[in-house]
Image (tube, grey):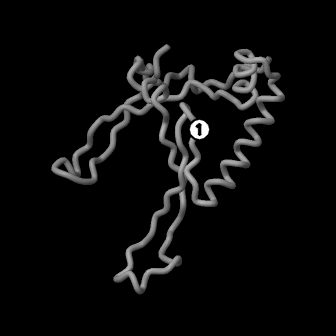
């Protein structure tokens, strides 16, 4: 399977090309893999029911939240690592800096080796551009 993409035009905001409009590729998702589907796929590979897998994933989510809020990096073996990162405004000095300068926290995921390899084996396919016609403006017949 190929990863579909579409092209978009954006103005370059910095650097030597600032102000120019360039064309870039943007990945286009073809759908979702729901938690239910994920649990079914995992249970098909192991000796656990889909409900057991869901219970484990729910517990993993709870425990990861607890560990991340405690300041720990959560290592999930070959899957990868999760850690909290923060952003802050700059203070004039160390003495002036306090927690009010911290803007927000976000979670950073670093994929393991196997997931990193996934990036190198991807094929790309350009999405057909959408062309408006008179037919596309007609109301759909109800069944």
Residue 5, image x, y percentages: 43, 26
Indicate whether 143 appears above or below 116: above
The residue at the point 82 percent across, 29 percent down is: 52
- Vertically, is 8 above or below 38? below
Residue at 70%, 16% in the rendered image: 45
Provide the secondary structure element on which disc 1 rests: loop
Coordinates of residue 90 in the picture (x, y in percent): 38, 74
Relative to 125, does residue 69 appear above or below in the rendering? below
Residue at x-position 78% and y-position 18%:
47
Residue closer to the observer: 102 or 62: 62
Label 1: few (<14), some or many (≥20) within 10 Å? few
Say which quadrant the C terminus sits in. top right
Q: Is residue 91 left or right of residue 109?
A: left
Question: What residue is pinned by disc 1?
Answer: 76
**Residue at the location (26% across, 43% down)?**
21
Name the outermost residue toward the left. 16
Question: Which of the 4 image quadrants contains residue 72?
Answer: bottom right
- Quadrant in which residue 49 is drawn: top right
Q: Position of residue 25 (x, y in %)?
A: 36, 31
Quarter of the figure with residue 38: top right
**Could you tell whether 94 is left or right of 72 in the image?**
left
- Position in image of residue 10 (x %, y %): 33, 43
């Amino acid at each position: 399977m190929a990863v579909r993409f579409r092209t978009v035009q954006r103005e370059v905001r910095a650097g030597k090309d600032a102000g120019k409009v360039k064309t870039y590729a943007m990945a286009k998702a073809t759908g979702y893999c729901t938690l239910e589907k994920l649990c079914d796929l995992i249970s098909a590979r192991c000796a656990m029911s889909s409900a057991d897998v869901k219970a484990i994933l729910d517990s993993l989510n709870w425990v990861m939240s607890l560990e991340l809020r405690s300041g720990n990096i959560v290592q999930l073996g070959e899957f990868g690592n999760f850690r909290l990162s923060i952003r802050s405004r700059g203070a004039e000095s160390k003495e002036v800096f306090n927690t009010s300068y911290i803007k927000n926290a976000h979670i950073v995921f670093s994929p393991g080796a196997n997931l990193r390899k996934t990036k190198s084996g991807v094929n790309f396919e350009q999405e057909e551009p959408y062309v408006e016609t008179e037919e596309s403006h007609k109301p759909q017949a109800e069944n």
